[in-house]
Amino acid sequence: MIDINSTVFLVDGQTEIMAIKAKFYMECGSAPEFRKVGCNGKSVTAEGYASAALGTLNAVLRDRFLHIVCVVDREKRRLLAKNFGKKLRESIIRKVVENTKIKEDDIENKLVVFVPDRMFENWILSDIEGIKSCSYLIKQSCRQKNFEGKNGVRELKNIMKVQYKKLLHAKKLFTSVRNRDGCLNSKSFNIFCTEIGIK
């Protein structure tokens, strides 16, 4: 597992911060630090994201962090999640090297990029049986299927008993996802768990 105390996550928004942090606390007793980049969207290119995140990246690269974990939704981009992650990582490294005094090796060794396919809610949907433990939220009649590449928010709304509210429900649901089961049902979640070391 990565060293939590020397890791920082760069994420799209408050939903990811609350949910991923809660999962780490539940499984490890502590959590890494988080920074919200908040510039993702279906029209944002890898280069555009790298430009918007440059200030945050520059700050964390000069801090104590040995690992920088970037989690960015694929949204409706045509590229496969894995390919978009590779392109985004290359763009970030290039942008940092071109605009700071940080050496390429320094960021190469620290940066890893993960891309939920196609949004963070798809990772929540990776273990239907697990999230059904939240019986007051999830319909017991729903069944596991391959949710990769689908509109995760819409799919989640379809199986919920109440209206889905990200800041209220994502944390509870994500902490109910069992990693081993989730990894079997979601390639993008499997890549995340395997490389972070929480399988």
Image: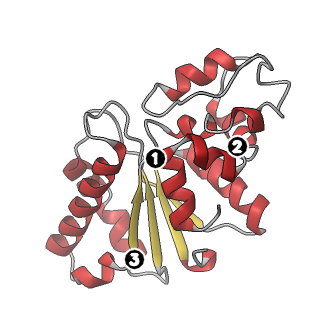
Judging by the rendered image, the residue that carries numbered circle 3 is 110
**Label 1 with label 2: CB-CB less than 8 Å:** no
Q: At which x and y percent is residue 159? A: 68, 19
Judging by the rendered image, the residue that carries numbered circle 2 is 171
Look at 54% across and 63% down and name the residue there: 194
Q: Is residue 195 above or below residue 110?
A: above
Quarter occupied by the N terminus: bottom right
How crowded is the residue under tag 3: few (<14 C-alpha within 10 Å), some, or many (20+)? some
Q: Is 35 or 191 nearer to us in this picture?
A: 191
Query: Real-space Cα distance between discs 3 and 1?
Result: 19 Å
Please name the amino acid that badge 1 sits on: Asp
Look at 40% across and 66% down and name the residue there: 112
- Number of labels in the image equals 3
Residue 41: give its label.
Answer: none
Q: At which x and y percent is residue 169? A: 71, 33
Please name the amino acid that badge 3 sits on: Lys
Query: Real-space Cα distance between discs 1 and 2?
Result: 15 Å
How crowded is the residue under tag 1: few (<14 C-alpha within 10 Å), some, or many (20+)? many
Residue 12: give its label.
Answer: 1
Asked whether, in this view, residue 163 is left or right of residue 189, the answer is right
Place residue 196 in its image quadrant. Answer: bottom right
Please name the amino acid that badge 2 sits on: Lys
**Label 3 with label 1: CB-CB less than 8 Å:** no
Question: What element does badge 3 sit on?
Answer: loop
Question: What element does badge 1 sit on?
Answer: loop
Q: Is 88 or 53 nearer to us in this picture?
A: 88
